Image (spheres, helix red, strand yellow):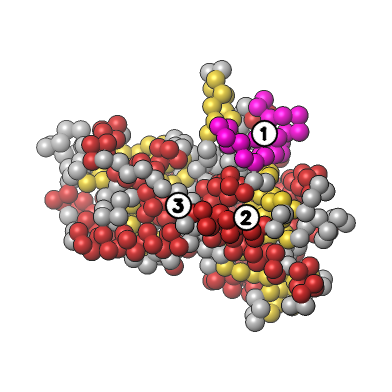
Amino acid sequence: MEYLQINTLQKELHGNNLIVVANREPYIHHKSNGKIEIMRPASGVVAALEPILRNCGGLWIAHGSGNADMETSGPNSEILVPPTAPKYVLHRVWLNHEEELGYYYGFANEGIWPLCHMAHTRPVFRLSDWHHYCAVNKRFSDAIMSHATQQNSLVLVQDYHFAILPRLLKSNRLQPKNFPGIGLFWHIPWPNPEAFEICPWHKELLRGMLGADVIGFHTQYHCNNFLETCNRYLEARVDLGTFSVTMENHETRVRAFPIGIDTAPVRTMTDSERRELKLKYGITSDIVAVGVDRLDYTKGLIERIEAVERFLEKYPQYIGRFTLAQMGSPSRGHIPSYQNLVTKLHQAIDRVNAKFVSQNNSGYKPIIFMEKHHDWDEIQYFYQIGDICLVTSLHDGMNLVAKEYVWCQKPERGALILSKFTGASRELSDAFIVNPYSIEEMADAIATALALPATDRERRMLALRKKVQNHTAYHWASDLIATLLHESPQRRKTTGR
């Protein structure tokens, strides 16, 4: 199955060079105590796209954020990756401290991120941040152009960090010869028009995005919001029949492409290995719920802790027998709202752990919190100790943790509790779908999932695994690339479509 998906994707490329542009790099070199280590970041973008380039080759352009990235890169700021078996080129763009604060922490993550998520955190927009955002987008445009002159390049721009980048590429005089297609995939939700207007540069962002030939979102709902936003604020023709926006004689198709994961086989642990791994994490209870998240206020982490607290209050027979093991990857620590989240999260965990000390189990903690970066080799086995997985995002574009858990878990065990405000809930309907703002509903869902008969549990997990396998990262990339190649303006001119 995986071989056929890769083969189809390679055929779709038609010999075009694939260029992925993302803020996050797939491999980070970090030096600690004089030793250089290679890290794989916890990122949905990386999880979905890195296997594509590993199998099809190409170029990944990203911000070089590791403190040993420059030391390990070649004279052209490039390095072949993966380190053990190189398959593609990683080109790193260097940013100074001010640029990183303004472009990444400022405009992208204090501005656009909360603007697009219904998590009730007020967005902050500063003129200086906007200037840095524009300058960094221009820097990435220059990096792309330095490679695109060599052969036809299919460019996949990733996410809200580069909203104006497609327009910069489109306006370059080398277009369209060197760019048979420019795609922009927006990995986070798209808000309603009234919310998006809060951004002082909302028109500039829209014009920048419409430099792409195809704009992708995870769900049709987000596509509809985007089209309505364009119709409200731009002098452009919005066609609901073809789901396209035409501005300045350039047509952009808007499509839903639900993203998937790499479904390469994951080794299943034995029961004894699972017990050993639980001991490694200090888990003494026989029932385990797992969570794997960046420490972000959109992930519903405080609500998750409160749901566990309420679950143990309502179902005291599980005290001493149930533990939530939560992996939390530090994220955006320069931003006050993230600092406040971590403080509140620690306070909530300490309160719940103190409340449910078990006299019969001296080492028992209802919540074990692991606040550090974890690589995939560890996470794929961590998932397997989870009798349930809690995905309680307050708002999410997709959330690949839900799909990863399903794929890593044995078919006959496990259950997924999934927020209705994730894109994944549209696909994974056999999960226990919950409202993360309802603590009672989540607490009851935990109890229901744990009491589920074995036959029903296996039926649900098999159905979930089938959906994950039928919509992988390769399907997502193939659909996006096929749409770019067959529906780009240049292609439509030659075929008369």
Quarter assignment of residue 194: bottom right
Q: In the picture shown, does residue 147 fall above or below 449? A: above
Task: Indicate yes or no whether the magenta region holds residue 265.
Answer: no
**Residue 51 in sight in this render:** yes
Nearest the eye: 33 or 214: 214
Question: Mark 1 Cα within 10 Å, few/some/many (few <14, many 20+)?
Answer: many
Q: Residues within 10 Å of mark 3 (few under 14, many from 20)?
A: many
Q: Which residue is mark 1?
A: 79
Label 3 residue SS: loop
- Range covered by the magenta-colored residues: 71-95
**Sequence-first disc among 2 and 1:** 2
Residue at left offset 15%, top offset 51%: 316
Q: Nearer the viewer, residue 214 or 329?
A: 214
Residue 495: x and y in percent read 76, 74
- Distance, label 2 to label 3, CA atoms, is 17 Å
Among the two numbered marks 2 and 3 on one chain, the one whose residue lies closer to the N terminus: 2
The residue tagged 2 is: 10
Residue position for label 3: 263
Q: Are marks 1 and 3 in contact (CB under 8 Å)?
A: no
Could you tell me how far apart the alpha carbons at marks 2 and 1 are, in whole angstroms?
Answer: 23 Å
Question: For the C terminus, which image quadrant?
Answer: bottom right
Q: Residues within 10 Å of mark 2 (few under 14, many from 20)?
A: some
- Relative placement, left or right, of 345 versus 167 is left
Q: Amino acid at mark 3?
A: Thr
Q: Which residue is at a point 54% across and 27% down the rendered structure image?
A: 37
Provide residue 62's location: percent of width, then percent of height.
66, 42
Q: Amino acid at mark 1?
A: Ile
Instruction: Give the amino acid at mark 2.
Output: Gln
Q: Residue at x 50, y 43 (%)?
A: 42
Q: Residue at x 52, y 57 (%)?
A: 4
Residue 214 visible in the shown view:
no
The mark closer to the camera, 1 or 3, is 3
